[in-house]
Image: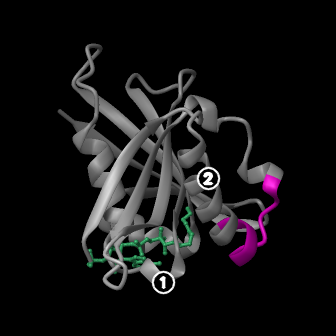
């Protein structure tokens, strides 16, 4: 599958908002029954989003396939620069084609070279059904399973060295 990603800072451009909203409503809203207000929590404006598109062989154009957002956590107790990965969603017809992995790799490739240290920490709350996916992307699970939006989750993290 030929993929093309773009990075979007904030939630300003109509086309970006449209693509992100359509994917998340399909995956989190329709598929998982998560409430709109829980998904669109007001934090998209201060997040960096990745939108992935896949080449549609029939039309020859690129169509939206997945999205994820990253948010700097200022009050995290660890000494590292901490970024939280949230809202990872790939449309069903594009799953297991490398879209999720590509979005993380694309974000890491544009990672700003941080002045405050060479080590950073990426954290996330994984749906338990996606734990293996994140483990394949080098995240480690920690702590007990807990409920978020009525779904079992587990905390995971990955240290990033630059
Ligand atoms: C979880 C999700 C984002 C994965 O996206 P994806 O594009 O299918 O993942 P990729 O194709 O990039 O997979 C990368 C690797 O993880 C594996 N993988 C993907 N989903 C997996 C899963 N649910 N369980 C186990 N392994 C999985 C792939 O086989 C692949 O392995 P490989 O590197 O050995 O080939 C997607 O299934 C999804 O959107 N699910 C619904 C929403 C959701 O649960 N989001 C996570 C919220 S925490």
Q: Which residue is drawn at the image coordinates 56% and 37% (left, top)?
A: 13
Using a 10 Å C-alpha cutoff, classify the residue at mark 2 as few (fewer than 14 neighbours), some (14 to 19) or many (20 or more).
few
Q: How is the image coloured?
A: one colour
Q: Which residue is drawn at the image coordinates 51% and 49% (left, top)?
A: 124
Which residue bears the numbered disc 1? 93
Residue 115 vertical placement versus 104 (above, below)? above
Q: Among all residues in the image, which is located at the extreme left?
A: 162
Q: Taking 2 as reference, is 94 left or right?
A: right
Q: Among all residues in the image, which is located at the extreme top?
A: 115
Residue 40: percent from the left, percent from the top? 73, 47
Q: Taking 63 as reference, is 114 left or right?
A: left
Q: Is residue 46 magenta?
A: no
Q: Which residue is drawn at the image coordinates 54% and 35% (left, top)?
A: 47
Q: Nearer the viewer, mark 1 or mark 2?
A: 2
Q: For the C terminus, give its image quadrant.
A: top left
Checking the image for residue 18, the label placed there is 2
Q: Which residue is drawn at the image coordinates 36% and 47% (left, top)?
A: 6
Residue 154: percent from the left, percent from the top? 57, 60
- Residue 36 seen from this side: yes
């Amino acid at each position: 599958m030929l993929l093309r990603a773009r990075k979007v800072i904030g939630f300003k451009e109509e086309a970006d908002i449209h693509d992100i909203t359509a994917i998340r409503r399909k995956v989190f809203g329709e598929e998982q029954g998560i409430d709109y207000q829980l998904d669109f929590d007001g934090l998209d404006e201060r997040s960096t989003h990745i939108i992935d598109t896949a080449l549609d062989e029939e039309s020859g154009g690129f169509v939206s396939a997945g999205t994820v957002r990253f948010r700097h956590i200022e009050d995290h107790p660890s000494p590292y620069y901490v970024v939280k990965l949230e809202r990872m969603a790939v449309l069903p017809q594009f799953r297991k084609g490398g879209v999720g992995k590509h979005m993380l790799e694309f974000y890491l490739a544009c990672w700003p070279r941080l002045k405050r240290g060479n080590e950073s920490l990426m954290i996330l709350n994984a749906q338990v059904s996606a734990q293996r996916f994140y483990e394949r992307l080098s995240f480690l699970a920690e702590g007990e399973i807990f409920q978020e939006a009525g779904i079992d989750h587990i905390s995971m993290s990955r240290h990033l060295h630059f």
